[in-house]
Image: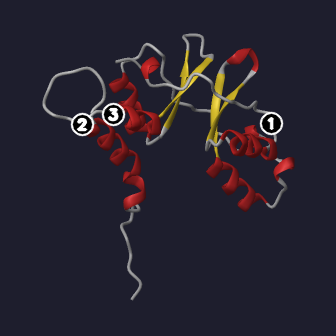
Amino acid sequence: MRVRDFMTKSVVFCRPDTNLAAAAAMMWDKDCGTLPVVGDGGRVTGMITDRDICVALGTRNKLASELRVRDVTSGHTQACHPDDEIHSALKTMREGQIRRLPVVNHAGNLEGILCLDEVVLLAQHWDGAKRPGVSYEDVVNTLRAICRRHTQPKGGWSRAA
């Protein structure tokens, strides 16, 4: 199966010069936790999450209306194409430890978004039969890889005595 079989095609996005208050309002209105950042020419230049906004506001002592999306997003964004095989996109998610992947055409323009949540809803129970699609095992292995960074800090857990 292809990414296009799982992706959400109607995606709200923001621009690099969008302020954080407006980006947060878009996320609230559309009930989503991330927005692709689309620059001039329609190319995806980044992703911003609700967490990015919270951390920026908590560490910069500025109003959300004073900070721009470009101020808190990194320049590197992983993406996939609609015709990519779904398992290839899941591998990208595992390796990048990300739950949402912008789907772009070959010019880098936004065509949709692949959310692990949607893949979970379309997953099939693995019964040993060879069939196209995504199994529960595929989804769980992807989610485990994404969550791995949250289970144990690099130095290991320390217990308070």
Residue at image coords 68%, 38%: 30
Whichever of callouts 2 and 1 sits on the residue coming sooner in the sequence is 1
Q: Residue at x 37, y 23 (%)?
A: 86
Relative height, residue 26 to residue 10 (above, below): below
**Dividing the picture into quarters, in which one does residue 57 lie?**
bottom right
Numbered-mark total: 3
Along the line of sight, which residue is nearer the eye, 61 or 13?
Answer: 13
Marks 2/3 in contact by CB < 8 Å: the verdict is yes
Query: Residue 63: where, in percent of width, then height?
Result: 85, 55
What SS does tag 1 mark?
loop
For badge 1, the amino acid type reads Thr
- Label of residue 37 in the image: none
Query: Type of residue at label 2?
Result: His
Q: Quadrant of the N terminus?
A: top left
Residue at image coords 42%, 35%:
93
Q: In the image, which disc is placed on residue 123? A: 3
Residue 74 visible, this angle: no
Lateral position of residue 125 relative to residue 29, left or right: left
Q: Are marks 2 and 1 in contact (CB under 8 Å)?
A: no
Q: Position of residue 11 (x, y in %)?
A: 63, 27
Query: Is the C terminus in the top left, top right, bottom left or bottom right quadrant?
Result: bottom left
Q: Which residue is mark 2?
A: 125
How far apart marks 2 and 3 lie (CA) works out to: 7 Å
Judging from the image, what secondary structure is the residue with disc 3 in? loop
Label 2 to label 1, Cα distance in Å? 42 Å
Q: In this picture, is 13 found above or below 109?
A: below
User: Dot 2: what SS?
Assistant: loop
In the rendered image, which quarter is residue 150 located in? bottom left
Residue under numbered circle 1: 18
Viewed as shown, does residue 135 lie left or right of 84? left
Query: Among all residues in the image, which is located at the extreme left?
Result: 128
